[in-house]
Every structure is written in C-alpha cells, then in structure tokens.
Image (cartoon, rainbow, N blue to C red):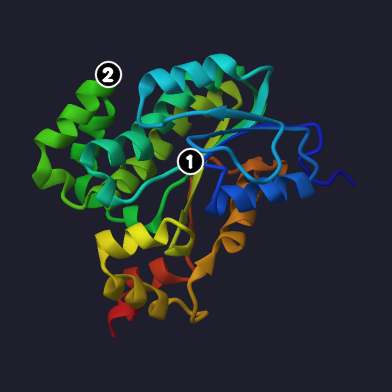
Amino acid sequence: MTNLFSYAGKRVVLTGGTTGIGAALAELLYELGVEHLTILDIKAPTGRCDTFIETNLADPASIDAAIAQIEGPIDVLFSNAGVAANAGVRTCMAVNVAASRRLTDGLIDRITKGGTIVYTASMAGNGWPAQVAEITELLEIADWDAFLDWCEAHPEVVNDVYAFSKMCMQVYVMRRSYSAIRNGIRINSICPAPVDTPLMADFKVSMGEDAINWAVGVQGNGRMAVASDIAPSLAFMGSDAAAFINGENLHVDSGLSSAMVTGLAFS
C-alpha cells in the first residue's frame, strides 16, 4: 500500500526553516524521506537542508532574487516564516502576508499538479469574519508598497497588527485556493495557538504574558505547544494524505478555538 504521508521523491521549499516550527518541520521532512529541501530564511539553518537561500522576507527584491535561484519543479511550498507585532506594522504585514503572496505568485506555475502550498497562520486570526470586507479590499491591492501603505493608513482596521496579519492569511487561503485547485494545486493553512519558540519572547512583549498564559490555561493539555507539536500538522497538510483538503485553515490549538467559540473559555 502506498504511504500517503511519505515525502519520498518530493521537492520542498520552506520559509523560516532556521528555528522554531520551521526547523522542526525540516527535521521531520527528512524523516519522511524528502528528496530535496530548499530553505529561505534571513539566517542559515544549523540543521540539514539541501539548499539554503538567504532571503529577507520584508524585501520584495530579496524575495524575487530567491525565487530566481530556486531550481527545478516544486511539490510543496511551506510559507512558514513570521514575525510578531513589535516588528511594526509595515514589517509585520510584509513578512506575514505580502511575502507569502509574492512567493505564491512567483512559484505557483512551478508547483507540480497535485502539489500544495501550506501557510503557517494562527488562531489569532480567527476574528476575520468581523473584518472580511476590509481584508478583501486590502487583498485586492497587488502592488507591494501600496498594500503596506494601505495598512499604515488604516490603523483603526489593522489595530492589533499580528492578529490582523493572520486574519488576512486565513481569508487569503480561502480566496486563493478557489482558483488554484482548478490547476491541480491545493492551498491550506494551519492555525496554531501560542507555541514555545524563540519568537515567544516577542509575543510576550507585544501581547503580554497574561494573555499568553490565559490562552495556555484554556487549552485542555495544560501546557504551551512546542514546535514538534505543530510540525506534523504542516507535514500532513503538505502530504498526499490531505489530497482532498483545500481552502482549509486547520486549528492546531488543543481546543482553544472551540472553547472560545462556544464561550466555555470565558465561563
């Protein structure tokens, strides 16, 4: 029987593969037999990869240069890199949203039929329904600088920039997946709760330790997730085992989102 979870023969591109979830995913992909892994990051990974391309995901020219250096067909693109709100509105929206969109547009024609794109979004973006009109307006702006200018010009909409960036990604997944699947390419995201990675220090500054601790306390398992808890969900979404999943923002949060939707988190 075919192993639908295997990455044997697959060529994968991963952003943010140096630390945290990306580093855990890279390690897991080799365990699953990945043929070739290209990592795009601002710092070189200490773990294994076949090709490293230094990339500043806040800079469109750097992204375009990376796209030009990626060789061969691609089976899976994991757009995983992200920053916290204390990076500032322009950088946060660039790295968390605009970079993912630019990579998608630049690489989608090289993704094999049956291939997939998986983003690391966040359950912090679950509030998108209340702002879907504004998010849709923003996502229709194709130009990089005009996109970021809009964000700076609408502080009343952007407000919590990290949460807003992840709202945008959840909506983007649903919109972009509709056309992509007609070319045989699936697009999905995973939406973790707080994860204990090197980025957590920035989240504690931007969100506050009380908010982080509250979220962890609501989760049923009584601890914060670690990178190795999240990487398997990304690997699953990129595998053939998820071949009929498209346009999905998968909550990987030990029930936190469910508890919030049902009101049990506040009881």
Where is 161 relative to 209, above or below?
A: above
Does any portion of residue 28 appear in the rendered image? yes
**Which amino acid is tagged 1?**
Gly
Left or right of residue 130, residue 180 in this image: right
Image location (x, y in percent) of residue 118: 54, 40
Element under label 2? loop
Image location (x, y in percent) of residue 181: 54, 28
Mark drawn on residue 247: 1
Residue toward you, 94 or 139 = 94
Residue toward you, 99 or 265 = 99
Q: Residue at x 76, y 45 (%)?
A: 30
Residue toward you, 75 or 12 = 12
Element under label 1? loop
**Which amino acid is tagged 2?**
Asp
> Residue 48: which quarter of the image?
top right
Image location (x, y in percent) of residue 20: 53, 54
Where is 39 relative to 85, above or below?
A: above
Mark drawn on residue 143: 2
Figure quadrant of the C terminus: bottom left
